[in-house]
Amino acid sequence: MFIKKSFVAVLALTFTGLSSAFALSSNSPIRSQLSTKECSFGKQGVKCLPVASINSSVESSTSLALSASGGDAAEAKSSSLMDTLQTGSYFALWYLFNIGYNIYNKKSLNALAFPWTIALIQMATGIAYFVPLWLLGIRKAPKLSFDDLKTLFPVALCHTGVHVGAVVALGAGAVSFAHIVKASEPVVTCALNAVFLGQVLPIPVYLTLLPIIGGVAIASMKELSFTYLALASAMLSNVSSAARGVLSKKTMTGKQIGENLDAQNLYAVLTAISTVCLIPMALAMEGTGFFTAFNEVVAGGEFTKKSLSILLALSGASYYAYNEVAFLALGKVR
């Protein structure tokens, strides 16, 4: 109980802090790494340009990580200690919230076997965080045209696949097995980059992927809770994440997209679009049976309506928190 209360307290403090202490000034230039492109943000919006180097290792939940830099080299050196401490705090919070998400997500799935609906709830929880920030003026709301939304839609659709695939995999098998399979994402990323972008890496780079492939194969053979659904869903998450990176480069490179679309607002917009996409998907896959199952679980006495609702809310809050802290952390080390 103490751990749960402590986690909730840190979660609340972080949600408050992310909008202020961790927020990026709209006047500061922001560089965004979406797969293999670099984006610059300003008052006029976001403009993405290709970069020369290729980052073949893409984190499933942070392939849209955006980096922030400001000031000259002298200022950076003078504040190196503070930057180090801030970066360390980002990674610590990322680790903490990711642990919390895995725990709350698995408990939610054990109580209610409705992964699509739970994925929808988790995605929609983020809206309750960033919309008030926009309405209260704490964070400038993005201004997007219909063409901007069309550009972002394919990326958001892939973002949806990343989350749904992971939630279904975690519900169908052990948490450890799902993460082992998701560790093979760099293999998928390299394959899609070669097919759709024509980016072929040196042979030694591809050879480093062999241990990953072998590790996943061995883990799959020895996993006691192995199911084809868990394997297929985890691979769906991998393919969606890699495709998100490829589409980001193909659709956003060289384009001016909206106003006030900084790192955090870009992630917020993708979350909102993904939520809208998930509504019909969840209804088609699971209907409204979630509500009946919710009442049955409460009637069974293991949960009250309040405790089960809090569990679902915590899974959603920790999901959004660890993703937002994750791209802030990667932005500091980029």
Image: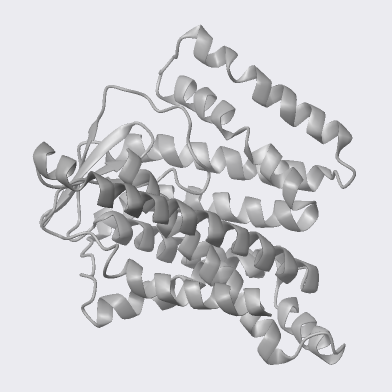
Front in this rendered view, residue 113 or 65? 65
Q: Residue at x 58, y 26 (%)?
A: 187
Give the residue at the far right of this rendering. 224
The image shows residue 163 at horizontal and vertical percentages of 57, 55
**The C terminus, quarter of image:** top left
Residue 195 position (above or below residue 268): above
Q: Residue at x 63, y 32 (%)?
A: 184
Please indicate whether residue 305 sits to the left or right of residue 81 in the image. Answer: right
Front in this rendered view, residue 303 or 118? 303
Q: How many marks?
A: 0
Scheme of image coloration: one colour
Residue 223 position (above or below residue 322): above
* Res 250 → quadrant: top left
Give the residue at the far top of this rendering. 203
Q: Residue at x 49, y 72 (%)?
A: 11
The image shows residue 247 at horizontal and vertical percentages of 40, 38
The image shows residue 299 at horizontal and vertical percentages of 84, 91
* Res 33 → quadrant: top left
Please indicate whether residue 3 sits to the left or right of residue 223 in the image. Answer: left
**The N terminus, quarter of image:** bottom right
Please indicate whether residue 263 sits to the left or right of residue 114 in the image. Answer: left
Residue 277 visible in image: no
Please indicate whether residue 144 sits to the left or right of residue 209 in the image. Answer: left
The image shows residue 191 at horizontal and vertical percentages of 54, 23
Front in this rendered view, residue 154 or 194? 194
Q: Residue at x 65, y 59 (%)?
A: 102
